[in-house]
Image (spheres, grey):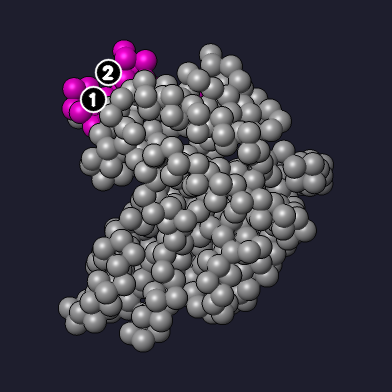
Amino acid sequence: MNDKSLETYWPIKSMREADVYFYLEAIQEYLPDNRVRVAGHGEMLMLGGYSYLGLNGHPAINEAAQHAIEKYGTGAHGARMLAGTLEIHCELEAKIAKFKKTEDAAIFTSGLVANISTIACLMRRHDTVICDKLNHASIVDGCQLSGAKLVRFRHNDMEHLEECLKDPTHPGKRLVIVDAVFSMDGDIIDLPTVSRLCREHGAMLMVDEAHATGTVGATGHGIEEHFGLPSDAVDIKMGTLSKAIPSIGGYIAGSHKLIEFLHHQSRGFIYSGVLPPSAVAASLAALEVIEKEPQRVSRLHENQRYFAQRLRETGFSYGHSQTMIFPIMVGEDWPAYQLARSCQRRGVYVQAIPHPVVPKGMARLRAAVSASHSREDLDFCIDVLRASAEEVGGIL
């Protein structure tokens, strides 16, 4: 692939020449009150990050990470199956299982690795994976790596899902996989119906709660809590430790049998280096903070309702979002780049999401509110979005 064809996929050169390229900008410092200092841009209000509960820098979490370094050092002596399992890894897996109300859990080096390696481990040729069309790319990658037949149903369309489950041409074991919260749209899967259909048609169910852990449900315990479903409504529960939880890693929670199988068969578990002790300790402490400080979840829900109201009043479209993620819909890629860059110049850190990350003609800004935003912060963001939209034109 030559430079010209690369530019067709992502017009980096043209964006830089027009001064609308803002990706990979280095954050120099995390400041109080949801501010960041960005190299070459100064202080900015963060509206594009994943610290949904404002836990990054929490004193108890920082202290736990520092103590883990003092006790274990900065790494371990090998892969988990050999010399790399520390007591703290086992503690985190037990804590996640308790948090998600499952028998056991396995931790991975990232959410992407958790998805890819779990799907590829469980499914084989002559099996079928049935996915929501807007599932995360890591889910699609795992399906392709597994060799299983991949069937995609229309986004959150339960009638189409039922048709797929009834189709006699879909062979072998069947696994339905859905995101809990869709990361580019902010809407929530219809889990009660998905779970019921899986039970009725003998399919396993896996749910990716990367953006739901800590944010969805009255106390942040996830999508089952949100819908008031029993803890066994989902067979395979996946989540990350790098969003509401300010660390790194991914997890799979489920039955003892499932986790034992993944521990001994999943390539992403067996052949990856281990999570560093500091990251594991930070995740443990963060889960404890979420349970001890439920007001953070309440504050997040209040802020997302307020921001949605202000967006509606101002005339912005944000799709069908039900969560803290707001797709500020623009349409074509270039106006989205321009809108984002105008916001950035006015001191709001928010990014444009173009095709092929989202369908063509549905480019947007991905705004995400946090429990740590004040009302004044959110009002400032609305004022900046309005002024920037008027500058670009054709958006409101």
Quadrant of res 230 = bottom right
Vertical position of residue 282 compared to residue 209: above or below: above
Residue 86 visible at all: no
> Dot 1: few (<14), some (14–19), or many (≥20) neighbours within 10 Å?
few
| 134 vs 372, nearest the viewer | 372
| 95 vs 227, nearest the viewer | 227
Q: Amino acid at mark 1?
A: Glu
Q: Secondary structure at mark 1?
A: helix
The quarter of the rendered structure image containing the N terminus is top left
Quadrant of res 173 = bottom left
Is 141 left, or right, of 36 in this rendering? Answer: left
Looking at the picture, how far across and down is residue 279, in whole percent? 67, 46
The stretch drawn in magenta includes residue 325: no
Q: Which residues are magenta?
A: 2-25
Is 252 left, or right, of 166 in this rendering? Answer: right
Looking at the picture, how far across and down is residue 287, in whole percent? 70, 57
Tell whether label 2 touches label 1 (CB within 8 Å).
yes
| 339 vs 189, nearest the viewer | 339
Is 302 left, or right, of 181 in this rendering? Answer: right
Residue at figure coordinates x 18%, y 22% from the top left: 4
The quarter of the rendered structure image containing the C terminus is top left
Q: Amino acid at mark 2?
A: Ser
User: First in sequence: mark 1 or mark 2?
Assistant: 1
Vertical position of residue 181 compared to residue 225: above or below: above
Q: Which residue is mark 1?
A: 7
| 98 vs 173, nearest the viewer | 98
Vertical position of residue 148 compared to residue 68: above or below: below
Looking at the picture, how far across and down is residue 129, in whole percent? 31, 69
Residue 377 visible at all: yes
Q: Secondary structure at mark 2?
A: helix
Residue at figure coordinates x 71%, y 48% from the top left: 282
Q: Which residue is mark 2?
A: 14
